[in-house]
């Protein structure tokens, strides 16, 4: 069992305290074990929790939530029923501290101005981000496109007038902003010199594609990894890997049944698995071996530390993750940069249709045919693939915006 945390002895004690609070039964203490062995023995006896189990816990403990919480919040509901995730004073203190640590690596007091662009007014990410940036003496505004009230022309004006240097949002929203600016004949304001993303899998190929759409130098990178129901767990390094907040969590690598469904190979010493997270700070949510459904490469450092590389979401889509990531890399590296694509897959018919949303320039027919052939090779199973650049109907609607837009769908 691979577990990553800052101090195994402290983690064992904190989990013991949480187990008592949430009435988890733990194995009897063995005085002959300590440190990593004790932690491993304790965690292996605890059940894996899910979003559904947290919803059930919340329903049974509403009085505690209502009496202890200082910030009432909910998950977005994009992956299921919204979960109430109120924050206590301790949650807020720890959360702000961690966001300050993360944002302090990429923004500068007196020089940067951040536009936080997010649709959920109930997201704790918004409140904690604003507080952390203000504590860093970095100016911040919160925005979101609202048809008829705050359109993309107004957003462009706000970014320009306030000389915003940094956009903080999701990858899907970045692409929708650039798409709508393009349709209005607008360029991303020149003051914006970095775009920091969170909330979705984000690859270096996608970052390069965004840079080609902008058509000038601009840093585009992930910034934080977390979940609204848990909080921020990691922040990004310059090489698209993540550094864990190991003092507040235990990170567990849950082995995958078939590793080659997710990666072609694993480097010596590294581990591939689904990330399970156990919280170590006192909260009103039992974050115990929480199944994030995200797959990570756990990479050992020479000094005994670990970094994490996000590979994507664990799901049952018939095109395996390793192949979807290859399709991502291929389509984000076409001769023409793209705003979005949607792949409709019909496994029973062995067909896949791809609709591309492009800037004004088009993709020559021969490149469409070559692209279709390359994707057919990736998918395999003699799949027939078509690529269409003229009839996009994949979720981007001019003048509107949503936080996440899928790229892979099963045909009806």
Image: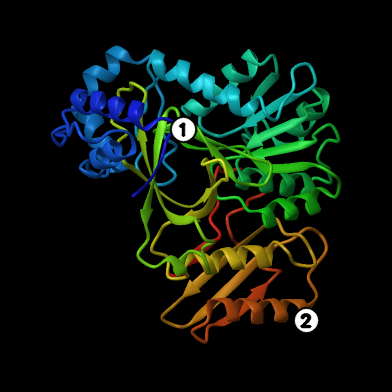
The label on residue 87 is none
The x, y position of residue 81, in whole percent, is 34, 41
Viewer-closest of 309 and 362? 309
The label on residue 366 is 2
Residue drawn where x is 64% and y is 20% of the image:
133
Residue 110 appearing in the image: yes
The answer to whether 289 appears left or right of 180 in the picture is: left
The x, y position of residue 215, in whole percent, is 85, 50
Residue drawn where x is 83% and y is 63% of the image:
361
Name of the residue lying farthest toward the bottom: 382
Residue drawn where x is 57% and y is 17% of the image:
131
Secondary structure category for the residue under label 2: helix
Is residue 138 placed above or below 404 in the rendered structure?
A: above
Residue 121 appearing in the image: no
The label on residue 246 is 1
The answer to whether 134 appears left or right of 21 in the picture is: right
Viewer-closest of 304 and 309? 304
Q: CA distance from mark 1 to mark 2?
A: 50 Å
Name of the residue lying farthest toward the front: 32
Is residue 203 placed above or below 331 in the rendered structure?
A: above
**Which quarter of the figure is the C terminus placed in?**
bottom left
Viewer-closest of 11 and 79? 11
The x, y position of residue 92, in whole percent, is 45, 17
Q: Check if mark 1's residue and mark 2's residue have beta carbons within 8 Å.
A: no
């Amino acid at each position: 069992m691979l577990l990553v945390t800052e101090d195994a002895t402290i983690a064992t004690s904190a989990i013991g305290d949480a187990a008592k609070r949430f009435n988890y039964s733990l194995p009897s203490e063995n005085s002959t074990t300590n440190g990593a062995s004790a932690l491993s023995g304790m965690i292996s006896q605890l059940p894996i929790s899910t979003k559904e189990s947290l919803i059930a816990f919340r329903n049974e403990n509403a009085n505690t939530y209502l009496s202890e919480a200082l910030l009432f919040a909910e998950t977005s509901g994009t992956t299921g029923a919204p979960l109430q995730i109120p924050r206590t004073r301790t949650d807020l203190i720890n959360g702000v501290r961690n966001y300050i640590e993360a944002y302090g690596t990429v923004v500068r007091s007196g020089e940067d101005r951040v536009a936080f662009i997010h649709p959920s007014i109930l997201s704790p990410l918004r409140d904690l981000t604003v507080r952390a940036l203000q504590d860093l003496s970095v100016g911040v505004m919160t925005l979101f496109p609202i048809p008829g009230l705050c359109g993309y022309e107004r957003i462009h004006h706000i970014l320009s007038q306030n000389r915003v240097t940094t956009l903080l949002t999701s990858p899907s929203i970045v692409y929708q902003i650039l798409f709508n600016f393009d349709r209005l004949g607008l360029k991303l304001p020149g003051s914006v010199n970095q775009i920091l993303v969170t909330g979705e899998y984000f690859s270096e190929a996608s970052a390069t594609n965004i840079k080609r759409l902008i058509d000038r130098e601009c840093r585009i990178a992930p910034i934080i990894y977390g979940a609204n129901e848990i909080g921020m767990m990691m922040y990004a390094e310059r090489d698209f890997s993540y550094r864990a907040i190991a003092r507040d969590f235990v990170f567990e690598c849950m082995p995958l049944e078939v590793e080659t469904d997710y990666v072609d190979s694993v480097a010596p010493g590294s581990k591939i698995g689904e990330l399970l997270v156990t919280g170590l700070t006192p909260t009103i949510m039992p974050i115990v071996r929480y199944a994030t459904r995200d797959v990570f490469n756990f990479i050992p450092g020479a000094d005994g530390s670990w970094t994490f590389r996000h590979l994507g979401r664990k799901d049952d889509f018939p095109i395996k993750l390793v192949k979807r990531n290859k399709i991502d890399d291929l389509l984000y590296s076409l001769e023409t940069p793209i705003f979005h694509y949607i792949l409709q897959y019909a496994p029973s018919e062995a067909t896949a249709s791809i609709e591309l949303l492009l800037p004004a320039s088009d993709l020559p027919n021969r490149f469409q045919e070559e692209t279709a052939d390359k994707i057919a090779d990736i998918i395999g199973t003699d799949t027939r693939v078509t690529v269409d650049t003229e009839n996009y109907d994949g979720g981007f609607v001019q003048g509107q915006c949503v936080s996440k837009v899928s790229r892979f769908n099963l045909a009806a």
